[in-house]
Amino acid sequence: MAREPNQRGGRREREEAPEFADRLVAINRVSKTVKGGKRFGFAALVVVGDQKGRVGFGKGKAKEVPEAIRKATEQAKRQMIRVQLREGRTLHHDMEGRHGAGKVVMRTAPEGTGIIAGGPMRAVFEMLGIKDVVSKSIGSQNPYNMIRATIDGLKKEASPRSVAQRRGKKVADILPKQIDAPAKVAEEA
């Protein structure tokens, strides 16, 4: 009976593996000087997502690279956030995110634009499942700060459905009215 929890745990890990995709963003080799010389360790930064609107990041430190990546992946899975996407491909509105000296600007984009973003931000958008976005990183180029600023901006996103619910209105009342240009010109003439 002592083996059952291990088997269940193994099954649960196998079920989670295909659900989430992960992307290694950065690995740092750090050294500690001790009496006999230097001891090396590794720090890994990983972004994890389901490519359907959930994303998280984590960092892990260990003496070996695979162990650092494993720790970072576990932390990322625990810290996931959900982001509402428009048509499952882009953001609902433009937004900014900040963390420390890092600032990022993210803009919604028409279909076919693709992901226009720099390294760490690109990893976040790909793991989130965004297909069209234009973004710019201003200030800090540190990957940790860029990812944190991107996540900060994504947390601020509000879908029309959530805004309508918060205000007690219908989604149609929130969205701007679309006016046909030719019909408007005909009325004026």
Image (spheres, rainbow, N blue to C red):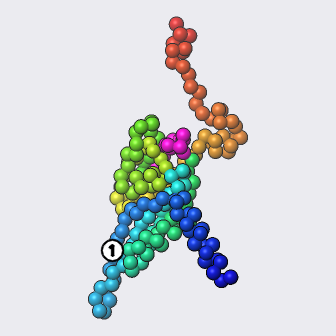
Question: Label 1 sits on what residue type?
Answer: Arg
The quadrant holding residue 46 is: bottom left
Q: Residue 4: percent from the left, percent from the top?
A: 65, 78
Q: Residue 74: percent from the left, percent from the top?
A: 51, 69
Q: Is residue 96 above or below residue 63?
A: above
Q: What residue is shown at x 54% (from left), y 40% (from top)? A: 87
Q: Is residue 97 magenta?
A: yes
Q: Is residue 38 left or right of residue 86?
A: left
Count of marks overlaid on the render: 1
| Few, some or many residues within 10 Å of mark 1 (<14, 14–19, 20+) | few
Q: Residue 16: percent from the left, percent from the top?
A: 56, 63
- Name the outermost residue toward the bottom: 35
Q: Is residue 167 above or below residue 79?
A: above
Q: What residue is shown at x 34% (from left), y 71% (from top)? A: 28
Q: Does residue 44 appear anywhere in the picture?
A: yes
Residue 186 or 20: which is nearer the viewer? Answer: 20
Check disc 1 and report its element: helix, strand or loop.
strand
Range shown magenta: 85-100
Q: Is residue 127 magenta?
A: no
Q: Residue 76: percent from the left, percent from the top?
A: 51, 65
Q: Is residue 152 above or below residue 35?
A: above
Q: Does residue 156 appear anywhere in the picture?
A: no
> Which residue is tagged 1?
29
- Name the outermost residue toward the right: 168
**Which SS type dominates the magenta stretch?**
loop
- Name the outermost residue toward the top: 189
Q: What residue is shown at x 51% (from left), y 18% (from top)? A: 181
Q: What residue is shown at x 42% (from left), y 48% (from top)? A: 105
Q: Locate the N terminus by quadrant.
A: bottom right
